Image: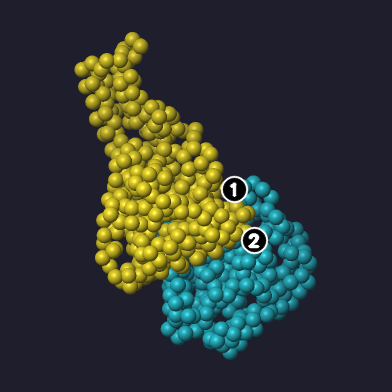
Amino acid sequence: MANGTMKNNGLQYLPFENRIAQIDRKITDLREQAGITDNNASRIRLLQQDLTAELKRLYSNLTPWQVVQVSRHPQRPLFRDYLNLMIKDYRELHGDRCFGDDPAIVTAFGQIGREKVLIIGQEKGRDIKEKIACNFGCPNPEGYRKALAKMKLAEKFGLPVVTFIDTPGAYPGIGAEERGQAQAIAVNLREMSRLRVPIICIVIGEGGSGGALGIGVGDRMAILQYAYYSVISPEGCAGILWHDGTQADKAAQALCLTAPELKELGIVDTIIPEALGGAHRNLHDTVYNVEQYITRTLRDLKRMKIENLLENRYKKILAIGGSDQKVIKSRIEKPKIPKRLSVEAQLRDIEKIPIEKESTAGTPTRDND
Amino acid sequence: MVNKQTKTMAKVKPGWDGFSLKPKREMPEGLWIACPSCQNMLYKKSVEENLDICPECSHHFRIDGRKRIRQLADDGSFEEMGAELVSSDPLGFSAAGKNYAERIRSFSEKGQNEAILVGKAFIRGRGVMLSVMDFSFLGGSMGMVVGEKFCLAVEKAIEESLPLVVVSASGGARMHEGVVSLGQMAKTSAALARFDESRGLFISVLTDPTTGGVTASFAMLGDIIIAEPRALIGFAGPRTIYETIKIELPEGFQRSEFLLEHGFIDMIVHRRDLRSEIGRLIDYCGK
């Protein structure tokens, strides 16, 4: 991704966002000019309209691979952002009481709306130092054991559990194997299926395989609009199918990993909308949407008797791949979108949109600088 | 000649199409086979008579589901259940010009219908719910049918209060069913939670290889976990780990002995003692 990203005004752009980057740059150029004249203000307004239209066009039609790229956007809100923005006075809890403390899984007591909850999330880290500490969001067994230990605590005191999933997968390392990565995840799956408090799981970025599932079993499953959830990373799948990780776009297409497809499969219950152009463009809107979803869902779940809740959870889990499994049949007839990915098509699009007037009018002012 | 062939196959296979999850062909056609462990030439029939174990070095060859049942259950006692279940191909998976639904069909034409066989059986006279994974079917991968059959076995075991014996041999979740196959990890684990609450005995037998989503769900949830000698058992495959950390993996890494040393399995049992060992464990647990 790194070679395709461009920087402007602090915001980083994905390879398919060239056009958006151009408009954004024009807007910042105009803004930077001293003394905003009427002419400039109206021009900025027009450009912003244009930007919105372009974002709408692009983001309503993302290919699965583009969705994966958005979900991995370097500026996408991470678990800590949600924690800080959503919860005023959280208390972080550390350690699995067994081996250590894994920074890739964060557990904390907090209050969402009026509800006191235990909040568990996978953290990738923002800067390189944090990223290394968090293993780039790949938890070790102690992370899963910490999550379980705190869930047991929540069960004891009747606190609902909210988990935030954002991981490329559980860490594949020697230490992780020695300490029983598989066993840690397996025990979590079993215990979460019968934890006697409501559990809500939200995929906020990458939902990578067993690593995501390790804190992803619950009563409700939600996913952000441009997050993905898959059994294997598109690169890994492409590596197996074609021995070529660069064909990940095709693999992403085949894996049905985007939010609408997951909803159709009955894996997720709700898609939480993101801000236009992805969560990183407007952090607060996205966090607000997530918060609303949690308060609403908790209210529903709290009304249920715990026995009914557990029975429903069990039935929900057992329905996955059961005899009444929904099948995506429309898959083959789906229009093939990747044409838009080609550079030629993108260039053609740029010429088509009537922004020429603006850009020609804009260039002389830049010369004055 | 044969010797040379197996040597190259142990490494990356040049003609591999990348799609096939077929096991290494450890038992090539012919009368003589080479043991991948000690390189001795063995008479095939004598190996088969020896429960597919190398008589020289006790290397346990991989065996398919039917053979496993023949070796483990009392003669003719296996009553299969859920044999009619076939994957509905939930994603409509087709990539690289290969169609998952067609592959499933080609297997069922050969008489193999899924990567797991479940049914009631007797082991040394003790009634059990036996569930055996078949590595020769798409790498023993866990898809929706594997999950469904597993849950069927657990339900029956609860109903008839039978001990559950599961022999795992799997590469993990089945990529071709995407996130539905991932859901099977949760599904089998949830079913085992119910089984646990009904105080059922679950003996998990790990054989070569047990990795990925199967290890990270039911295989590691056994009340008693048994492994065959030198079986590969782990979460991530050795190649994945090597590619991630770029460090030479230690000798015997992720083998049964390694897991025993780190406290994740109860015992390592030679294939010829498996029947008696399971029988004795069932007796101890009073089932």
The amino acid type of the residue labelled 1 equals Thr
Q: Is residue A219 above or below residue A57?
A: below
Residue A159, located in which quarter of the rendered image? Answer: bottom left
**Marks 1 and 2: CB-CB under 8 Å?**
no
Residue A316 point in image, percent of width and height: 35, 67
Dot 2: chain letter: B
Please say whether residue B254 is visible from this viewpoint: yes
> For the residue labelled by badge 1, is the local secondary structure a helix, a strand or a loop?
helix
> For the residue labelled by badge 2, is the local secondary structure a helix, a strand or a loop?
loop
Foreground residue among A6 and B267: B267
Chain A: give its colour. Answer: yellow
Residue B215 point in image, percent of width and height: 55, 64
Residue plotted at (44% across, 51% down): A92
Q: Residues within 10 Å of mark 1 (few under 14, many from 20)?
A: few
Which part of the image, by quadrant, shows the N terminus of chain B?
bottom right
Please say whether residue B147 is visible from this viewpoint: no
Dot 1: chain letter: B
Foreground residue among B39 and A89: A89
Dot 1 corresponds to which residue? B244
For marks 1 and 2, give the CA distance: 16 Å
Dot 2 corresponds to which residue? B254
